[in-house]
Amino acid sequence: MGFPLNDETQIFLERLVEEKGFVNLSEKLKADILDGLNARLVSFIVAAIAERLSEEDAERMNEIMEEGKEMSMDTVIDFLNDRVPDLGEVTAGAMMDFRETYLKGLK
């Protein structure tokens, strides 16, 4: 499952859809594609961040998720910022890797 799209992520994903060559899509189909891409992008980012967490921090994050505790996005970001000093760079790198993977084989 993805997170709600912020403006930058929305633009990023819309550009990917265009670069992939999907044009003249119905609004419903475009929304479905963007939802799917968002979920995949979040998985990519989470995997990149998980690689940088200590085993203890990764276990704590899993515990929180398994317990079903609702964490606000701000709480999650604070948790990760405290543990991954280059979180912005990791996220940006994951987004570029996602782009490359998604567009692979296009040319």
Image: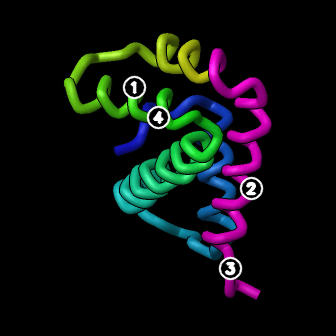
What's the residue type where badge 1 is placed? Arg
Q: Give the range drawn in magenta.
A: 81-107
Residue under pointer 1 = 60
Q: Nearer the viewer, mark 3 or mark 1?
A: 1
The residues bearing labels 4 and 1 have C-alpha atoms spaced at a distance of 5 Å
Mark 4 or mark 2, earlier in chain: 4
Give the main secondary structure, helix, strand or loop, of the magenta stretch.
helix
Q: Is mark 1 on a helix, strand or loop?
A: helix
Dot 2: what SS?
helix
x 52%, y 43%: residue: 46
- Residue kind at label 3, given as amino acid type: Lys
Mark positioned earlier in the residue sequence (3 or 4): 4
Precedes in sequence: disc 3 or disc 2: 2
Who is closer to the viewer here, 71 or 4? 71
Q: Which residue is drawn at 42% across and 50% down?
A: 39
Q: Quadrant of the C terminus?
A: bottom right
Please tell me whether mark 4 sits on a helix, a strand or a loop: helix
Label 3–label 4 contact, CB within 8 A: no
Q: Do the residues labelled 3 and 2 touch (CB within 8 Å)?
A: no
Query: Closer to the N terminus: mark 3 or mark 1?
Result: 1
Outermost residue on the left side: it is 67
Q: How far apart are marks 3 and 1 (CA)?
A: 35 Å
Q: Is residue 71 magenta?
A: no
Residue located at (57% from left, 72% from top):
22
Q: Are marks 4 and 1 in contact (CB under 8 Å)?
A: yes
Q: Mark 2 points at which residue?
A: 96
Label 3: few (<14), some (14–19) or many (≥20) C-alpha neighbours in 10 Å = few
Q: Mark 3 points at which residue?
A: 104
Residue 69 place in picture, x, y as percent: 25, 18
x, y percentage for residue 20? 64, 73
**Numbered tag placed on residue 58 in the rendering:** 4
